[in-house]
Image (cartoon, helix red, strand yellow):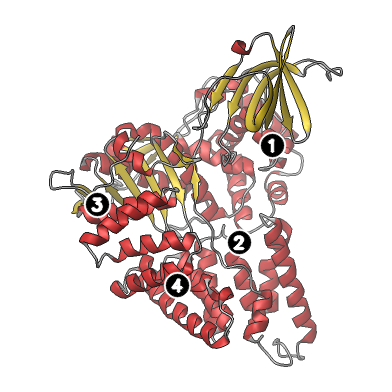
Amino acid sequence: MAIALSLPTEAAARWTRLRTAHFQFIGDAPAGQIREVAEKLEQFREVMVRALPGATAVSPVPTIVLVFSTDRALTPVKPLFRGSTIDVAGYYQSGEDLNYIALNGEYTDQALLTIFHEYAHALVGDTLGRVPVWVNEGLAEFYEAMQGLEAGKAVVIGRAPAQHVDLLKSSTLMPIKQLLSIDHDSPVYNEGSRRGVFYAESWALTHYLTLGNRERAPQFTKYLLALRSGVDGGTAFNEAFGADTSMLDRELFEYVRQVAFPALRLQFNQKITGEAERGTTLDDLDAEIYVGDLQARVGREKKARTRLQAVLTRKPDAARASTALGLIDYRARRFTEALPILERAAGQDPKDAFVQTALGRALTATLNDIPALDDRTATLAKARDTLSRAVEADATSAYAAGLLGYVELVEGANMAHAVSMLERASQLAPSREQYRLFLAQALILQGELKRATDYLGPLLARGSSAEVRNDARRLLAEAGNRGSQSAPGTGRPSGSGLLALNAVADVTLPTPIGPPRTIIRLDLRPVKDGETRVLGMFRAIECQQAGVILVVDVDGRIVRMEAKLLSEIDFITYRTDQGGSVTCGALPMPQRVFATYRPKPGAPAQGTSDGEAVAIELLPDDYIVSR
């Protein structure tokens, strides 16, 4: 469909801005709808903060919520797959510097189910850091079913989703030891008929440990606190519940087969709606800036650029519009084009943390491309001054503090300030391992080797990626080398003292630049009893006299699924580029799919099939299997 990009006229709907303690709401929906969304999101966040031990009331980066009046109004910011629109009622968009939530006010409840689930993951990550998959999904599934009561004064948590209860009562539960071992790469998590059982059992165990057994609830809190302190999942679970899980297996088995499940009513001391009950009118051009910025973040750069340039034509001093425009070039690593735009914006509004952080972020990203030491030094100084203004404007921004700490680390003149900023960033965003790596490096350069190794040990053992673990290993080796060279009794490196600038670059970690992540949960076909779903590449359809064989490559293993007629198979597409009919032979281009079939007992003989084909779900190329 064509999307009009002309700016609002006098007759256009007025926009409303509503600020609450943890969100900024902007919408062209009626003010009452915006207040309703504000109330529900603040309620949800309050409940999650109460539930997560050690949770902070401060968000590491701001979250802006766009509440659109209709699906048509939401469409310009809907995410894309392969350049075409995905039809969603709402979504959560994370970013290093800023988070967005966008939803259709006509379908608030539907949109909030997905948003609650994904926002729960963000809160768990911000509070507990990297946690085992079962507890991450269990907490999200448990709390997304929250129901508000009494106009914002109370909520009920713990409602049992019927689909989970029904599935658990008709399925064989996984042993808890198996549940604990599942990670994001496990086949059970990504494919097969047990995937639904994993989600349901994660919810059930979380429900049982939270509401089902008063003696187990303190153990669950102890477990979560241990995860927050960096203890690995297996050790934390054993210390909280004991190494023998057989008793807990029996308890959970009995729990999921009961008729009713407990729920908890939480009463608030006062109605949670936010600081501005009625909201204020927002200028149409200012609202367009937020729409344009979000468009750019979900891959609609061309439309975003047109929208933002139109704003600047009518309002040349709109610093946020210039910043959003400059960030389009920045994300594409066109730094030569981005920097003048971002510098102009920073000069227009020196007190806007978002504007200052964007310039500091771009300056930092150019450091590795500056060969001359004098130019590099000048760029570092400009980045430091810019990011200092950002931190002064918003002391709760983990990203601004982390970038300033990194700049101080590379500059090397004020390592104490580098440590201070990186400690703040690590506390505000414990899930961002990069900040702890930078902090450890600053501590090494400052001679505090014991503190550095205390941060690096858990990252080496349980870092979320091979890159993080390798960086931790490299820095531990650096700490060891410096420890062996220390002068007796000083605790400081011997010889030349702190590393010179070019030596720092040898162990400097990558600048924390990364594209934002848009989270979309496809409405996949449910896996029924007796069915298995696998993730693989759909390669061919073999047409035979007795029927057809569908050939799917699953990590190098060929799965062959039979059917008498192609019409008996459900072909479901989540792609926007599929057309024409399904025919016999090899596919011109193999397609990534979820393939569902009913397995035959025992291994198939050569030339026969693995089972009866049920469904083929065609996935977008850039679809990431959701958490």
| Other residues around mark 2 within 10 Å, as few (<14) / some (14–19) / many (≥20) | many
* Residue at image location 51% in from the left, 69% down from the top: 402
Query: Which structural element holds mark 3?
Result: strand
Dot 1: what SS?
helix
Q: Nearer the viewer, mark 2 or mark 4?
A: 4
- For marks 2 and 4 on the same chain, the one whose residue lies earlier in the sequence: 4
- Which residue is labeled 1 in the image? 179
Residue on which the image places disc 3: 17
**Coordinates of residue 144 in the picture (x, y in percent):** 46, 37
> What residue is at 66 percent from the left and 36 percent from the top?
189
Please name whichever residue, 265 or 369, is drawn nearer the observer in this view of the structure: 369
Query: Which of the 4 image quadrants contains residue 527?
Result: top right
Near mark 3 (Cα within 10 A), the count class, few <14, some 14-19 or many ≥20, is many
Q: Is residue 84 visible?
A: yes
Residue 153 in view, yes or no: no
Residue that mark 4 sits on: 360
| 3D distance between C-alphas at marks 3 and 4 | 28 Å
* Three-letter residue code for mark 1: Leu
Nearer to me, 572 or 191: 572
Q: Amino acid at mark 4?
A: Gly
Residue position marked by numbered label 2 in the rendering: 433
Whether residue 72 is situated above or below residue 328 in the rendered picture: above
Q: Nearer the viewer, mark 1 or mark 4?
A: 4
